[in-house]
Amino acid sequence: MEIDVVLPCLDEAEALPWVLGRMPDGCRAIVVDNGSTDGSAEVAARHGALVVTESVPGFGSACHAGLAAATAPVVCFMDADASLDPRQLPYVAESVLDGTADLVLGRRRPVTRGAWPAHARLGNRLLAWRLRHRTGASLHDLGPMRAARRTALLGLGLRDRRFGYPLEMVLRASEAGWRIGEVEVDYLPRVGRSKVTGTVLGTARTVRDMWRAAA
């Protein structure tokens, strides 16, 4: 198994040791530092990750910089806040690796009541409905843990550099005729405060960016 794992990162120094310490064999972590002020880049380097610096702010900017730095045939994406367990990456990537799927998203299954705030879950349901309506794919989550082939991803020509990047990826993949799948993954309480789902305003901003990407 040869997989590059892109982890967009903004002030996740506290979570990174746990995340990087659970990276499976054959998975190389690429931590994309997107303006951290808490020493995240140094922590990531000490724990063996390839560190990429992306000065242009935005979740999509960080994701795409990591994709550009990747060299493995298969690339996974996941959050760096310890809300997802890297040990489940092989499960998400399995269908891509064996050639039975082109893009697989991890459908989050909260392990505790507080892992997924109600406002964030509602926003996700709205966007998942939008995706099903646009693509016909049976998706129920935007899946921050996901896997696809690197060269194919680059060929999609993704342009969004904000929070619309994950949704645009699914839309462009559907338009290209990709086989899109979904598998369940554990969703844990994140370490530290979320920049996205931790507040109603953050969730609304994310939904806005993603809705625009689906327009």
Image (tube, grey):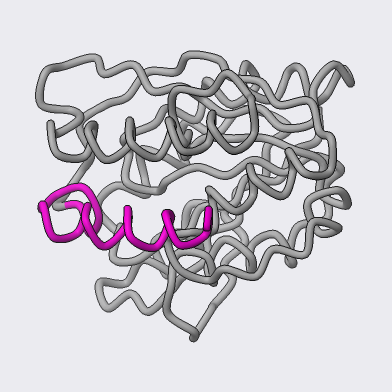
Q: Answer whether residue 166 is magenta in the image.
A: no
Q: Answer whether residue 209 is magenta in the image.
A: yes
Q: Is residue 101 above or below residue 13?
A: above
Query: In percent of the image, x 78 and y 51: which residue is there?
Result: 153
Query: In percent of the image, x 32 and y 72: which residue is there?
Result: 39
Q: Is residue 22 above or below residue 213?
A: above
Query: In percent of the image, x 22 and y 33: which residue is there?
Result: 122
Extreme bottom residue here? 55
User: As drawn, is 85 to the left or to the right of 92?
Assistant: left
Residue 134, given in percent of the width and then of the height, sits at 59, 38
Please name whichever residue, 13 or 127, is drawn nearer the observer in this view of the structure: 127
Q: Is residue 82 above or below residue 132?
A: below
Residue 110, given in percent of the width and then of the height, sits at 26, 18
Residue 117, given in percent of the width and then of the height, sits at 13, 34
The stretch of residues the image draws in magenta is: 194-215
User: As drawn, is 42 to the left or to the right of 31?
Assistant: left
Query: In percent of the image, x 57 and y 29: which residue is there?
Result: 105
Residue 98, given in percent of the width and then of the height, sits at 87, 17
* Quarter of the rendering occupied by the N terminus: top right
Q: Main secondary structure of the magenta part?
A: helix
Please name whichever residue, 179 or 71, is drawn nearer the observer in this view of the structure: 179
Please name whichever residue, 125 or 46, is drawn nearer the observer in this view of the structure: 125
